[in-house]
Image: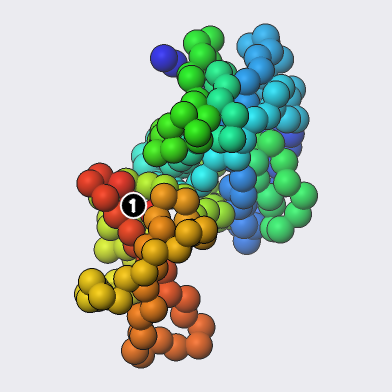
C-alpha cells in the first residue's frame, strides 16, 4: 500500500512566506475517505471527506526532511481510509492544509465498538528548505507504542522528567465511568518535588502499548 503525498499550493504559499525567525507549526492531522485525481491533489485546501482527527505524536529530523509520526485510533463509526492531511500555521496565523496524502487502496478503519484497541501509526516525510524553525502540536492523549514513548522521554523531546513510582494494590479503585476508556482503575498518589509549572503525566501500559493522561 503506497501513499502519494504532495505539498499543496496553499502549503507552498505558506512556506514561501517563512523568514529566518519564523515558526512553522504542524498543528493538526486528519484522515478521510474521499479521493480526487492526482492532478488535483496540489490544489486541495481540505480533505474530500474528512472522517476523524489523527494524533500527532512526534517529529524526527532526517537528512531527507522532517518525519512526522501520527497515530489513528478507532472512531465511533468505521470507514475506508483513502486520504489524510497535515495542517500548519505560520507564526500562529491561520491554519492551512500543508500536505495531503492519497492512496488508491482503502485502509479499513474499524469502529471503537468493533475494535476498541485498534491503532495504526503513519509516518509522513515533509521535504522543504530549513528556513526558520519547525514545531509540532503533540496530542498528549494519543495511544503510542511504549518503546516510542520511552524513547521520547529519555531523549528529553517532550521536555519531561521521568520518575518511577509504585502504587500499592490496596490503593487502586474501580471507576465505573473512567476518564480514559479501557482503564477503569484509578489511584490517588502524592507527588513530591512537583513545581508549580510542571504537570504530572501518568503512563499506563500493557505489552507494547502505552496511553498517557
Q: Residue at x 47, y 76 (%)?
A: 199
Q: Is residue 124 above or below residue 131?
A: above
User: On the picture, is 146 further left or further right than 64?
Assistant: left
Pick whichever, 41 or 15, lies toward us. 41
| Quadrant position of residue 5 | top right
Q: Residue at x 73, y 30 (%)?
A: 46
- Label 1 residue SS: strand
Label 1 sits on residue:
210
| Residue 25: percent from left, percent from top | 60, 52
Image quadrant where one finds the N terminus: top left
Q: Residue at x 48, y 59 (%)?
A: 176
| Residue 66: percent from left, percent from top | 45, 42
Pick whichever, 165 or 102, lies toward us. 165
* Res 140 seen here: no
User: On the picture, is 122 further left or further right than 204?
Assistant: right
Q: Is residue 99 above or below residue 178?
A: above
Q: Is residue 153 above or below residue 187?
A: above
* Res 23 seen here: yes
| Residue 72: percent from left, percent from top | 48, 37
User: On the picture, is 96 further left or further right than 134?
Assistant: right
Amino acid at each position: 500500500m503506497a501513499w502519494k503525498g504532495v505539498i499543496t499550493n496553499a502549503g507552498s504559499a505558506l512556506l514561501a512566506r517563512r523568514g529566518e525567525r519564523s515558526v512553522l507549526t504542524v498543528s493538526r492531522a486528519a484522515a478521510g475517505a474521499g479521493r480526487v485525481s492526482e492532478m488535483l491533489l496540489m490544489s486541495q485546501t481540505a480533505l474530500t471527506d474528512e472522517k476523524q482527527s489523527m494524533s500527532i505524536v512526534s517529529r524526527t529530523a532526517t537528512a531527507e526532511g522532517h518525519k512526522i509520526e501520527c497515530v489513528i485510533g478507532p472512531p465511533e463509526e468505521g470507514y475506508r481510509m483513502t486520504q489524510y492531511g497535515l495542517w500548519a500555521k505560520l507564526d500562529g496565523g491561520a491554519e492551512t492544509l500543508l500536505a495531503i496524502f492519497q492512496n488508491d487502496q482503502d485502509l479499513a478503519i474499524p469502529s471503537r465498538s468493533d475494535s476498541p484497541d485498534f491503532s495504526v501509526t503513519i509516518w509522513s516525510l515533509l521535504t522543504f528548505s530549513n528556513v526558520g524553525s519547525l514545531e509540532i502540536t503533540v496530542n498528549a492523549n494519543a495511544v503510542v507504542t511504549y518503546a516510542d514513548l520511552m524513547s521520547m522521554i529519555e531523549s528529553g523531546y517532550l521536555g519531561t522528567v521521568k520518575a518511577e513510582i509504585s502504587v500499592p494494590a490496596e490503593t487502586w479503585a474501580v471507576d465505573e465511568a473512567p476518564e480514559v476508556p479501557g482503564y477503569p482503575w484509578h489511584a490517588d498518589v502524592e507527588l513530591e518535588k512537583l513545581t508549580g509549572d510542571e504537570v504530572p503525566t501518568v503512563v499506563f501500559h500493557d505489552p507494547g502499548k502505552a496511553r498517557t493522561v
